Image (cartoon, rainbow, N blue to C red):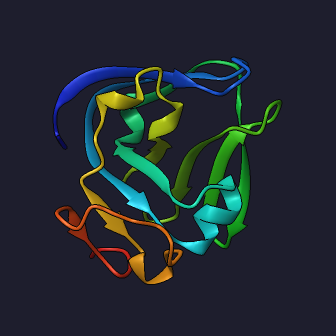
Amino acid sequence: MAGETKTHEGGCRCGAVRYRVAGKHTYSGICHCDNCRRATGGASVPWFGADPKTFSVTDGKIKEYESSPGIWRGFCGNCGSPLTFRGEGWNDVAITIASLDDPNAITPESNVFLSERLHWVKFNEDMRNYDGFPS
């Protein structure tokens, strides 16, 4: 649930990058946009948000790619695992839930960009669902 205080740790597939989030997460959701699909190779991407002051890289370095103006996607430069997403004007850093050591620790609460979802993707209609990004 958003706002729950807990320390979460995670990292990339090869172990070269490790991170820690020590604080409340601000949101959790599954993104169905074309950009996330292409960046990860997945049908959708579960993310959670955190205040950047609570996020720290404990081992290695996250490499970033400016995927569109003012938007940076972070990944391991060694194995390519997607890890973070941040943007100009954003108050949060988004972190891939699947990169957590315990990905069951945070349950997505919404679906975003359903207008771009693949027609064969099923989703939980009981969640908060948005055709785009909620304001």
Residue 54 horizontal/vertical position (percent): 37, 30
Query: Total marks drawn?
Result: 0
Q: Is residue 70 visible?
A: no
Picture residue at 43% right of the left edge, 49% below the top: 47
Closer-to-camera residue (122/20): 122
Of 19 and 99, nearer the camera is: 99
Q: Is residue 24 visible?
A: yes
Quarter residue 57 falls in:
top right
Q: Give the left or right position of residue 122, taking residue 32 as reference.
A: left
Quadrant containing the C terminus in the rendered view: bottom left
Residue 98 x/y as whole percent: 50, 36
Query: Position of 75 compared to 44: left or right?
Result: right
Which quadrant would residue 110 be assigned to in this image? bottom left
Query: Vertically, is 82 above or below 62?
Result: below
**Residue ID at (50%, 78%):** 119
Please indicate whether residue 128 sits to the left or right of residue 71 in the image: left
Residue drawn at x 50%, y 80% is 116
Compared with residue 101, is residue 63 higher up or lower down, i.e. above or below? Answer: below
Q: Where is 52 relative to 128, above or below?
A: above
Report x, y in % for residue 1: 17, 40
Q: Position of residue 70 (x, y in %)?
A: 61, 68
Q: Is residue 70 left or right of residue 5?
A: right
- Residue drawn 50% across the image and 72% down it: 120
> Which residue is more in the foreground, 38 or 50?
38
Given residues 126 and 82, the one toward you in this image is 126
Which residue is outermost to the right? 78
